[in-house]
Image (tube, helix red, strand yellow):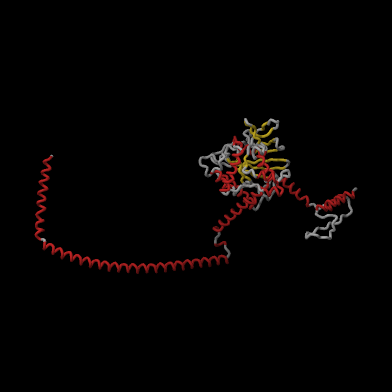
Amino acid sequence: MVTALSRSVQIKMEGSLGVSPSVDQNVHDSPIQKPNHRPVMACNDMNRLLVSKVGFANLPNQIHRKAVRRGFVFNLMITGISGLGKSTFINSLFCTDMYNADYPYNIYEFTSVSVLSPLSKCVITFKGPSKRSYSSGTCVDSRTFALSEANVSLILTIIDTPGFGSELDNSASWKPLVKHIDSRFESYLRAELNVSRITVGSGATYQPGLPNDQRVHLCLYFISPNGHGLHQLDIETLKQLHNRVNVVIIIGKADSLTPDECSQFKQTILQELYNHNIKLYDFPESVAKLGGADESYSVNEIRQARGRQPFAVVTSNNLVTLPDGRKVYGRSYPWGVVECDNLAHNDFNALKHLLMSVHLQDLIDMTHHVHYTNYFSSRLTSIAEASKFLATEDSREPLSQLETERLAHQRKLAKLESEMENVHERTNKLIETERDLVERAEQSEKHLLTQLTEFEKRRQEFEDERAIWESENRESLEALHITPDRGDFIKDKFRIKRKGLF
């Protein structure tokens, strides 16, 4: 019995290493060389098991235990105008009453029970949204939770933006969001470039050498169910966010739309996003094919869930009893009940599955490998460009300084030569201009002399004609001297006669 057991163990371990016990080890049918096992020495069962088992097959379990011990970090930003059910959505997404007006002001630890999830232990570090106070304009409020599910801990940071889109002038409402995202990138960059990296890692266990991940992994952008499309504020905000963070659009309070209106509204939103070249997080199907999805869900189901974008959700904090006796989270109306977790009513369940069960790690990886890498590159580029103006002559090497001075001297000589050529060209132009002016002056003088001679000639002719005419008409001229006196007499007589009329 013992011999048969040890043999079965040996055959099992050999099969796991890719070697069949019935195949001759000296025959190589493929270019991949198969290793030869050591002969098992005669010993007890435990020693045989230890000798035949290498142990690297346990590497995934080691990584799993290490990751579970550390825990995970996820930073979620949720934004949009007020009144779209953002707080209720967070409560429904994590199956806990994170946002509640009755929460105390201090840290509160509780265990919530949901009909859709196992027990969830949660540590609340802030008060409910109804008790918050903020100044006018867009504010950024960051709060942290410690969640636990099936012995897996999650440090969840929710970044809320109260006051977004509530002003008369919302042209700069997106700036606090962008500033907050960049500041988190900057803090992570400084921690990563720090010589002494004594910071916490992912989860509750402190790990030296790993910067605390405060980067925003996902932004849930809520839009109003107006049925007409995106507002200008939505378009401008999405343009600023889609290159910095993973963005997912959610249509809040979708129960106000009919199925046809909701479908048309989704098509309008997708077309506007395409026209403005706005790229959202597309929940890549490759993540599911590589094993990111739960085995209970097929790739076709995940593909169907992806096709519901943008997601139209309906959420509620209240349990509603259905006619069949089931209790579900939903909204009760005179005509019936809208179930939050019913895919026939809204897209909440599909979105929850994609976010929490399939693409949660991919969102973190995308943040690190795409968005943070882009910020890192742009930041280092700006630092390198700024450092060029800080270099001094004393900090250069002698050979480099001589080469720099030689090049500067050559540039100076080239500049002087260019200036001399310009002066020579200007001198030639001045000489030509002077020659032209002299020629014009001579021509003008000749023309004036000609005109003056012609004028004197005509004046002399006129004087001669005048003298001849006066000699011929002397008597007529004498008669003209009498005519003005007679005219004055007639005028005086007429003036006296007018006075008599009045």
Outermost residue to the front? 260
Residue 360 versus residue 128: which sits nearer the camera?
360
The picture places residue 329, in percent across and down from the top left corner, at 66, 34
Residue 390: quadrant of the picture: bottom right
Q: In which quarter of the image is residue 20?
A: bottom right
Depth check: give the residue in front, 329 or 333: 333
Q: In this view, does 392 lie above or below 167?
A: below
Identity of the residue drawn at 78% across and 50% down:
58
Horizontally, residue 344 falls left or right of residue 1, namely left
- What's the residue at 11%, 61% (across, down)? 473
Is residue 107 in view from this perspective? no
Q: Is residue 374 visible from the viewing direction of this image?
A: yes
Q: Position of residue 441 (x, y in %)?
A: 30, 67
Q: What percent of the width, then of the height, locates residue 132?
A: 59, 36
Residue 10 place in picture, x, y as percent: 85, 52
Label total for image: 0
Quarter of the image where the C terminus is located? top left
Pick the residue in front: 315 or 159.
315
Give the residue displayed 70% in from the left and 32% down from the top: 326
In the picture provided, is 69 more to the left or to the right than 264?
A: right
Is the residue 372 above or below the residue 460 in the image? Answer: above
277 is higher (above) or lower (below) than 160: below
